[in-house]
Amino acid sequence: MLLNAAFYQFFRWPTYRDARPELLVLCRALELKGTILLSPEGINGNVCGPESAVRDLLSKLREVTCAAGLRARESWSEEPSFKRLKIRLKRKIIAMGTAEADPIERTGARLAPAELKRWLDENKDILLVDTRNAFEVREGSFRGALDLKLSHFHDFPERIETIREAAQGRPVVMFCTGGIRCERATAHALGQGLSEIFQLDGGILGYFEACGGEHYEGKCFVFDERETLEARCS
């Protein structure tokens, strides 16, 4: 079995360009496949390979990038989830059009998967907001979640009024695949004057790991050769 690791972290990284050559050599030596984005605001990656190789990479990243808190969402596959290795330099590790909300400065409070499950078990009056694209939502989502019908994440700022009207004083919990889009989405929502904004810590994949598929219908779309994942408790 091969280990898949999806990871990201926002942090100030003025020397990000210098990290690419060394990272390329390391990943090739470890025979890893996947995509890693490096930018002045941090790192975002999804890789696949033998368990020991993936864990070696994550350990090295925590040292090289000074991102000691880097966490990864893990899953397993029998075949490689990527065909090749790509390490790219980007202006941002997740873009949202012209909106420049900075997750390093401010972002929504993190809600643990177990806490969201408890709220859903208790039928707590919350607004669940799916920040993913419409084609991802069609594969599966939390029951009762608000689908913003995004064709691209760049559309999110235009939909903020939909969220404002639907919230009506309730806690707003945003979620995405692994958490990174909600970092910028909740930052933008807070900047637009919304309050009591939460983000599901670790996204859908983190919820699957901790809580299985309860309160979730369908599968989770992923951007690799597998296309979708089913809920499984680790």
Image (cartoon, rainbow, N blue to C red):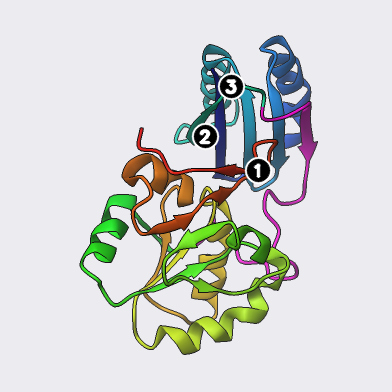
Q: Of label 3 and label 2, which has the lower sequence position?
A: 2
Q: Residue at x 67, y 44 (%)?
A: 223
Q: Give the SS element for disc 2.
A: loop
State yes or no: discs 3 and 2 in contact (Cβ < 8 Å): no
The label number, if any, that marks residue 78 in the structure image: 3
Is residue 147 among the parts visible in the rendering? yes
Q: Residues within 10 Å of mark 3 (few under 14, many from 20)?
A: few
Give the residue number, with chain letter if any, for mark 1: 227
Of marks 3 and 1, which one's residue comes earlier in the chain?
A: 3
Q: Main secondary structure of the magenta part?
A: loop
Report the span colored magenta. Answer: 81-106
Type of amino acid under label 1: Glu
Q: Nearer the viewer, residue 156 or 16?
A: 156
Judge from the rendering whether residue 16 lies leftward or rightward of residue 216; answer left or right.
right
Q: Where is the C terminus found, in terms of image quarters?
A: top left
Q: Nearer the viewer, residue 202 or 218?
A: 218
Q: Disc 2 or disc 1, which is closer to the eye?
A: 1
Q: Where residue 67 is drawn, which disc sits there?
A: 2
The residue depicted at 51 percent of the width and 81 percent of the height is 163
Circle 3: element type = loop
Q: Report x, y in % for residue 195.
A: 40, 78
* Relative vertical location of residue 19 with respect to residue 164 in this rendering, above or below: above
State the residue in front, 144 or 21: 144
Which numbered disc, 2 or 1, marks the residue that appears first in the sequence? 2
Residue type at tag 2: Ala
Query: Where is residue 183 shown, x and y percent of the image?
Result: 53, 58
x then y, percent, for residue 116: 31, 59
Question: On the rendered structure, is 55 left or right of 121?
Answer: right
Identify which amino acid the numbered label 3 is placed on.
Glu
Q: Mark 2: few, some, or many residues within 10 Å (few <14, many ≥20)?
A: many
Residue shown at 46%/80% (left/top)? 194
